[in-house]
Image: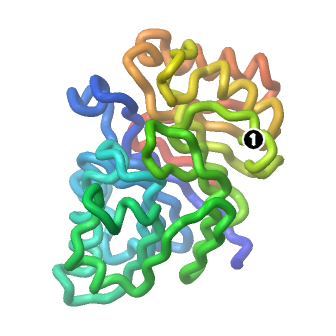
Amino acid sequence: MRNLKNKIIFLGTAGGRIVTFNLIKRSGGFLVEDSGHYLHVDPGPGAFVYLHHLGIDYKKIDLVVLSHLHLDHSADVNTILESATNGGKYRNISLFAPKSAVIGEDRVVLPYLRKRLIKEEFFSEGSTHTYKSWKVKAVIKHRHHKAETYGLFINDKIVYVSCAGFEERMLELYPKNAKLMIINTTFYRKRPGVEHLSVEDAELLIKELTPKRAVITHYSMEMLEKGIERVADELSDKTSVEVIPAKDNLILEV
């Protein structure tokens, strides 16, 4: 693995139905950039358009990664795969995803596009997958409304805590001291029976796992009304770790 700095580009920061499907914030997931090539995580609604607005060449996307099949994380996966191959003229992209996102009645990846992939691999808890300069470990299978959902560790640097109901075993399975931890922090307060993370959960994860920096994203209306800068400041004060509130088109170097 090359020891180069990566860039993270947040195409969108929406979480939950109201914020996502009323376009209060953009969706689209995030990109990891390495030497002008990209890994695209969770290309939700609008990802194709937002990439175009940023002037990113679709053919430079090496790899698409899905944490799970919910539409706010996968709605543009087919468009990204199709555009990256220029309608099948190129064979230059791979896909890592839960099996349920690709096979079965609830699949979100169209079958004909699978034939255009160089590599297709399915996550299981603890599995590690590589392609070109990219390494993705499925650290943990989350509890998330019956959807097969995984938290990820990318290039031994970036922890992605995807949608989940909090479990103590997250503190055991996620790596400590990562360069960056991205946490889908949907709610300010815990909501019993709703399997999304709250600010309280994010605080515990950051305190116990001690990343160098942390980013909160995937906001509900509650989070936006509280003020994401204020919430990030609260978390920074409580954890002694720099916590950054992701914004649409935010670029970070790792």
Q: Is residue 13 above or below residue 121?
A: above
Q: Where is the N terminus found, in terms of image quarters?
A: bottom right
Give the camera-side residue of 138 and 154.
138
Where residue 16 sits, quadrant-wise, is: top left
The answer to whether 217 appears left or right of 83 in the picture is: right
Where does the image place residue 74, in percent across and percent down from the top left?
A: 32, 53
Residue at (41%, 22%) from the top-left corner? 220
Name the residue that disc number 1 marks: 169
Q: Is residue 107 above or below residue 239?
A: below
Residue at (55%, 40%) from the top-left corner? 143
The answer to whether 7 appears left or right of 203 in the picture is: left
Where does the image place residue 132, in percent across and percent down from the top left?
A: 55, 83
Q: Is residue 238 above or below residue 96?
A: above
Element type at marker 1? loop
Residue at (78%, 51%) from the top-left corner? 175
Give the camera-side residue of 195 and 185.
195
Where does the image place residue 12, in percent across and percent down from the top left?
A: 38, 41
Q: Amino acid at mark 1?
A: Arg
**How busy is the neighbourhood of tag 1: few (under 14 within 10 Å), some, or many (20 plus)?**
few
Where does the image place residue 48, in percent across and percent down from the top left?
A: 24, 57
